[in-house]
Every structure is written in structure tokens, then in C-alpha cells.
Amino acid sequence: MNISYLKNKYHEAFIVDPSDLGNPTLNKIYKRVSGNLKTMPFAYLVPVSIAIIFFVSLLFKFSIVRIATLLQNGF
């Protein structure tokens, strides 16, 4: 094995193709959402998770305490 072969293999390991979802609109949405999630994930994940728990509690008529117990026990 020579050094140039190893260098080429090393650079190939770090080549990442851009994400293409096959639809320009979906690509724009994906890039916007993934970019924001990379920089500040908790600004989006915390409100979404609170909204999901709220709607689950309304849907199944659970109390917050029962939902927390369910989540802590791992379903």
C-alpha cells in the first residue's frame, strides 16, 4: 500500500453527499428544520414534547401524574 492510496481512502471517509429528498419543497423544509435543530434543539423539542403530552392527556383523559409515571416506567 502506498501513501497516496491511503490518503484517497481517508478523504473518501469524510465525503458526505448532500441530503436530497427528491422534492425541492421537502429539501427546503428539511434544510430549514435540520439547521435549526443543530443550532438550538431545545427551543423546538421542549415545546413540541409539551404539546404532545398535553394532547395525549386530552385524548386519553390521563392526568399529568399518570403520564409521568408511565414515561418513567418505560411504558
Image (cartoon, rainbow, N blue to C red):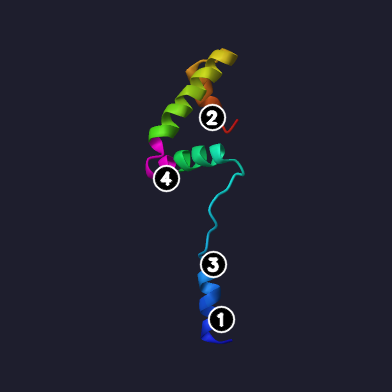
Lower sequence index among marks 1 and 3:
1
Of the 4 image quadrants, the one containing the N terminus is bottom right
The percent position of residue 15, horizontal first and vertical second, equals: 52, 63
Crowd class of label 2 (few under 14; some 14 to 19; many from 20; radius 10 Å): few
Residue at mark 2: 71
At horizontal 52% and vertical 73% (from top left) the residue drawn is: 10
Q: Are marks 1 and 2 in contact (CB under 8 Å)?
A: no
Q: Is residue 9 above or below residue 54?
A: below
What type is the residue that disc 2 sits on?
Answer: Leu
What type is the residue that disc 4 sits on?
Answer: Lys
Residue at mark 3: 13
- Identify the magenta region: 35-42
| CA separation in Å, label 2 and label 3 | 39 Å
**Element at label 4:** helix
What type is the residue that disc 1 sits on?
Answer: Tyr
**Element at label 1:** helix
Lower sequence index among marks 2 and 4:
4
| CA separation in Å, label 1 and label 4 | 34 Å
Lower sequence index among marks 2 and 3:
3
Q: Are marks 1 and 3 in contact (CB under 8 Å)?
A: no
